Image (cartoon, rainbow, N blue to C red):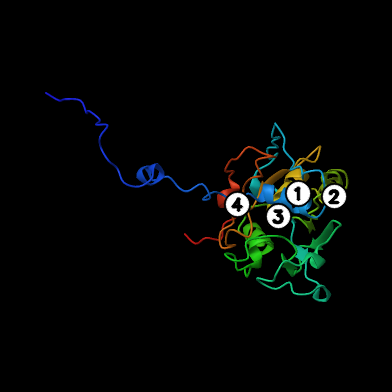
Amino acid sequence: MISGCKCRKDVTMSGSLDDQLGFAPDYDSPIPYMQRTRDYYAAIGYTTPYRWAHYVEAPFQPLKKSLARSRVTIITTAAPHDPAKGDQGPGAPYNGGAKFYKVYEGDTSKQHDLRISHIGYDRKHTTATDSGTWFPLPQLLKAAAKGRIGEVAPRFFGSPTNRSHRVTIDIDAPEILARCRADKVDAAVLVPNCPVCHQTTALVARSKPTAFRLWSWDAPKISSSTLLCRASYSATFRWATPPASRMISSRRR
């Protein structure tokens, strides 16, 4: 006969309830960067709390042709290196002077020196020595050479990390979309490098009408040795793992 367990009220247990149950302390939580942004603007005199872009529905644009036949470009928030704008090297302190405020483009047949000193990222735990994490053009060219994508578009584009939703939606996003259309782009790899960068690329991805497929690559959190393409930021697309997760990978098997 199996008897049921009877709990005794007089059992004495040492330590707090959290310790007994193995709970993490209240302060052990993800970095509240959205609240930090609101606090920052409040501290410098803005009376209206910063409003992060948030949408109820997430649009989705499927590819109209296979990746092996698609023309792919890169849309990054990294900035062109300018020696006149101070330290922009690996691990450089935040450098607001290195920011750019207009959409720029570059020839994908040439090498480019892009940096990320102008945005906020974890400088303590990220070395920022692998430029392929914020500008994966070499990986994209390898993918084209192996036939995993049809070709690399003639131009890549830089999107300003503008905190103004209106400027991004009305000026920057339409400009990038127009240039992608001119280059007959089928798909784009979005490369955000900071919290505001994710918002920026999400708004770019929502450009209407978006005629091509976009994936987001979380940089600089991963190594460029493996390019992981996923459906873009949750404010823009439903999370998914498209075929490109294997399509643009330089990992040796």
How far apart, in angstroms, are the residues tagged by discs 2 and 4? 28 Å
* Quarter holding residue 141: bottom right
Residue 107 seen by the camera: yes
Q: Are marks 2 and 1 in contact (CB under 8 Å)?
A: yes
Residue 72 seen by the camera: no
Q: Are marks 1 and 4 in contact (CB under 8 Å)?
A: no
Q: Is residue 76 left or right of residue 67?
A: right
* Residue type at the position of mark 2: Asp
Number of the front mark, 3 or 2: 2
Give residue 133's position: percent from left, percent from top: 64, 62
Give residue 228's position: percent from left, percent from top: 58, 53
Q: Are marks 3 and 2 in contact (CB under 8 Å)?
A: no
Question: Sequence order check: which comes first, mark 4 or mark 3?
Answer: 4
- Residue identified by numbered label 3: 151
* Residue type at the position of mark 4: Ile
- Residue identified by numbered label 2: 172
Q: Please name whichever residue, 28 or 112, is drawn nearer the observer in this view of the structure.
A: 28
* Quarter holding residue 128: bottom right
Q: Residues within 10 Å of mark 2 (few under 14, many from 20)?
A: many
Q: What is the residue that sits farthest to the left in this orientation? A: 1
Image point 51% across, 50% down: which residue? Answer: 28
How far apart, in angstroms, are the residues tagged by discs 1 and 4? 19 Å
Mark 3 element type: strand
Numbered mark located on residue 200 in the image: 1
